[in-house]
Amino acid sequence: MKILHITAQKPFKTGSGIYVRKVIEQFDKKGFKQAIIAGISNEEKIDITTDLSLEKYAVYFNVKEMPFPVIGMSDVMPYESTRYRDLDENMIDCFTQAFSRQVMEAVKMFNPDIIICHHLYLLTALTRSLIKDKKIFGVCHGTDLRQLKSINLKQDFIKDNIRKLDAILALHNDQKKDIKEYFDIEESNIHVVGSGYDDSIFYCRDLFDKKEYIKVIYAGKISYSKGLIPLIKAFSSLDIPKDKIKLSLAGMGNGREYEEILNTAKESPYKIEFLGNLRQEDLAEKFRKSDIFILPSFYEGLPLVLIEALASGLHVITSEIPGVRQWLGEKINNSGKIRYVPLPRLTKVDIPVEEDLPRFESNIKKEIQQAIKYINENTYNDNLDVRYLSWRELANRIEKILYDF
């Protein structure tokens, strides 16, 4: 089987970028021939991994033909980016022409059996409008739905062409319902496949005794929508000696949001460190040396970092992100290793109602304290087997759907 993967943004650093890379790696092990189209900056390469047989078709940003940074599916990306909401007609034309050329070139030269497009958004719709005689699957990552609901950019064009996809891959059942209602697509054309993690990198530490020094860690973009300001405020109000706990934030952001989060952390009486972007191997090592992972996001598609943290043996605290309970299943939810914080009311997709934030912060504080209590009363163990959520199993689920078509 020959598969062409298409993404408008960099196939590294972000959650969807990791998803693209890991699926490609797993399909390579199955012997599939693959190619990728991706948007990158003019000084970069499509650097997924060196030992794969992969044809690469780059679409360059920050060049004469497209003189602006790579467009990000989130408004805040861990690298310099352009927001979709800031595109004017000329920029959209540049984007459309550049990607159209590479899509047509890749289809002509590589001649794929199947095209997998990431994000149910502008590029996926453009690909479907250009290519009529190939099977095209769209992968929803959640951020695409957020864009569709928050800005009015080519919505009719996008909706019309997303409906014409051969199938859509969703992260969880709540998302499947959302896709069905938003695009008016038959439920039978939407398949829930979940996400994955690398079980060769993320695995559990050895047993250990009661902790005297608690390490809390977050990993993801450093932005408002990740709930980091409420987290820092909740952490700063803990009733714990300052030398007994530390918070580490792994990831990057940019602009005003990033600066405000940095400044909020500086005001905390507790130690808060910013680790920057970490390689997966380095993040896994940080996880194994930590005790509690926390993800206080207001909005997510399906955060694979939750599985990575659970696989590493961490006690996990997460906001009540739609679809996560169902996706993780009873075994994990009843394990004592995960706690859920109710979300505040949201305006739009990921903006909290201001008056709900004190309660949200209070609940985060309570769950951190409960997690510490749990840690002090229980030794960690390595028998929470989450390998059924690995990239290998995700690729198996996707492969079955591809062959069914």
Image (spheres, grey):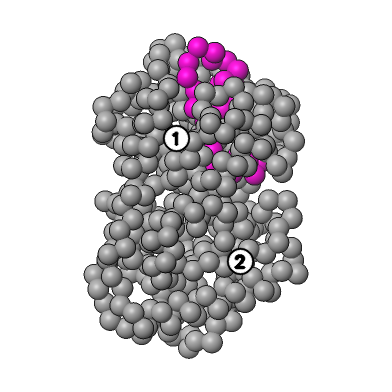
Q: Residues within 10 Å of mark 1 (few under 14, many from 20)?
A: few
Q: Which residue is mark 2?
A: 342
Q: Which residues are magenta?
A: 124-147
- The answer to whether residue 215 is above or below residue 179 is below
Whether residue 138 is in magenta: the answer is: yes
**Picture quadrant of residue 68:** top right
Q: Quadrant of the N terminus?
A: top left
- The answer to whether residue 211 is above or below residue 85 is below
Residue at figure coordinates x 67%, y 74% from the top left? 359
- Tell which of 153 and 277 is nearer to you: 153
**Picture quadrant of residue 3:** top left
Q: Which residue is mark 1?
A: 44
Horizontal side of residue 145 vs 152, given as left or right: left
Q: Where residue 318 sits: x, y (%)?
A: 52, 64
Horizontal side of residue 361 vs 18, given as left or right: right
> Upstream in the sequence, badge 2 or badge 1?
1
- Tell which of 147 and 245 is nearer to you: 147
Amino acid marked by disc 1? Glu
Q: Where residue 233 sits: x, y (%)?
A: 61, 74
- The answer to whether residue 85 is above or below residue 343 is above
Residue at figure coordinates x 40%, y 62% from the top left? 332
Residue at figure coordinates x 57%, y 44% from the top left? 175
| SS of the residue under disc 1 | loop
Horizontal side of residue 37 vs 162, given as left or right: left
**Picture quadrant of residue 161:** top right
Whether residue 68 is visible to the viewer of this picture, yes or no, is no
Whether residue 173 is visible to the viewer of this picture, yes or no, is yes
Whether residue 15 is in magenta: the answer is: no
